[in-house]
Amino acid sequence: MDATRQPHQNATLDVVRHALPEAHWPTAEEAASSRLFSSVRLGPIEARTRTWVPAMVPWRATEDGEVTRDVIDWYARFALGKPGVLVVEATGVRDVPSGPLLRIGHDRFVPGLRRLVEAVREASEGQTRLLIQCIDFLTIKRRPTKEKFFGRYLEIRQHHRDATGEFDDTAVRSALAGFDDDRLARVLTRDEWRDYAFGYRETVNDTHLPHVAELPRVLPGLFADAAARAREAGFDGVELHYAHAYTMASFLSRRNVRDDGYGGSRDARIRLPIEVYEAVRARVGHDYCLGCRFLGDEVIEGGSRIVDAAWYGARFAEVGMDFLSVSKGGKFEDAKQPKVGEAAYPYTGPSGHECMPTVRSDARGPFGRNVPLAAEIRRAVRSAGHTTPVVTAGGIGTFDLAEEILRREDADIIASARQTLADPDWFLKAERGCGAEVRRCIFTNYCEGLDQKHKQVTCQLWDRDFEDGEDVPRSHDGKRRLTAPQWTR
């Protein structure tokens, strides 16, 4: 089968509700001799174990992108579980409004980020390596009302006049607003329909917009400045966000057809990601950990596939990245239509399911579903003569599965987001022979639903677990606790 036309998860496939696999937990002695709890080098640094908490956005920063007490508590709680590596959420490299997401686009953010680093060092007793994920994203707006779109946003063009038989712009707008959606779908261009039905969204192909055309000139410096601030704040390294629905991933996509030398062929699509890496490396030096998270498969129609990702991985290793973290999907192009007044969310469609598979899945199930992508990328990296460690993720919640992946050499490091949210101590419990005490994620994506609504992210397994008189930080509505209960032995 042509690699560009492989089938993917969609609504027509039979849905199976999968039970959680039985878990065998090691004794402390077995854990000590395991691959999972052995050390691994990430370029200039060493992680104590091959356990990795990937970036998750908890919606706890201020509206200005500053670190809050809730942000510090969130990361300190994960650090108590002493993972080998903890990655701080996607943090914006621009100094622009972006809601309660962390930012690193100005020097004023450094003091707060330094406090976060210090809290993680203290909670983990210095045993956890701390990275920060740096991201850039283009403009996306909420889905407008029909009246607002045709009254204010649509740029009237000749095909609109032809379709309505009107020539005055006001009359054209009024006529279009009276069309039903079936007729509008035939009249509007693809991009106009998207902006009407889903909300305005910029893409890297919009080179008619000066700021989009200038991205290759602007982004290397922005990422380099951000990485310098990360180093100043005390982070052990930076993860460049080249995945999902955002700017850098869009440059890597086969759907990137820019004609300025930064789109079209693989060599052109990878050009800016490498230039960003090289600018950052030049700023922070070779004694600082620097890697990226990127997609093994975009899943969307016309998007990049594993054959592209394996090639990208070998090139990233060649230029000197210290690790490669592999994800899947999570794109705007197949997202569900948002309600009026809401923005599209890139984890609602088939590619979103593949990024965060649930127990309601196809026959393959969600557990370790995306490991083959990391395995193929790792093989390409090794075949090219590089030893760059590869991180895998996606539905990994037991010691047995993690150890099997490592012993098969499908990956070098195990990342677990949802299971670690369910139980921030699960790696430590397994390492100490207390696996029977692990609170196991049930993979229903309750947490993802909160993220979609831009609510403070928690886990349904513990966020209503209040003890009488317990004083813990609570959500804005006071109904949910914001960090998991402490593990006491």
Image (cartoon, rainbow, N blue to C red):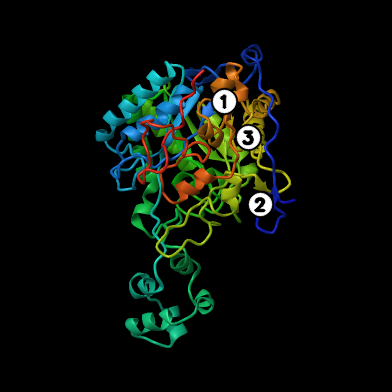
Considering only order in the chain, which callout, 3 or 1, is on the residue closer to the N terminus? Answer: 3
The extreme front residue here reads 468
Which numbered marker is on residue 374?
3
Apparent side of residue 407 relative to residue 150 in the rendered image (left or right): right
The extreme bottom residue here reads 165
Question: What crowding class fits label 3: few (fewer than 14 Cα within 10 Å), some (14-19), or many (20 or more)?
Answer: many
Image position, residue 136 (x, y; %): 40, 44
Q: Is residue 244 visible?
A: no
What residue is shown at x 46% (from left), y 38% (from top)? 56
Q: Nearer the viewer, residue 483 or 100?
A: 483
Select label 1 or label 3 by which is in front: 3
Instruction: Tell me the residue that label 1 is attached to.
Output: 388
Instruction: Give the SS element for disc 1.
Output: loop
Select label 3 or label 2 by which is in front: 2
Instruction: Give the SS element for disc 2.
Output: loop
Question: What crowding class fits label 2: few (fewer than 14 Cα within 10 Å), some (14-19), or many (20 or more)?
Answer: some
Instruction: Tell me the residue that label 2 is attached to.
Output: 9
Q: CA distance from mark 1 to mark 3?
A: 12 Å
Instruction: Give the SS element for disc 3.
Output: helix
Image position, residue 16 (x, y; %): 71, 49
Select label 1 or label 2 by which is in front: 2
Q: Nearer the viewer, residue 294 or 275?
A: 294
Image position, residue 316 (x, y; %): 53, 33
What residue is shown at x 37% (from left), y 75% (from top)? 147
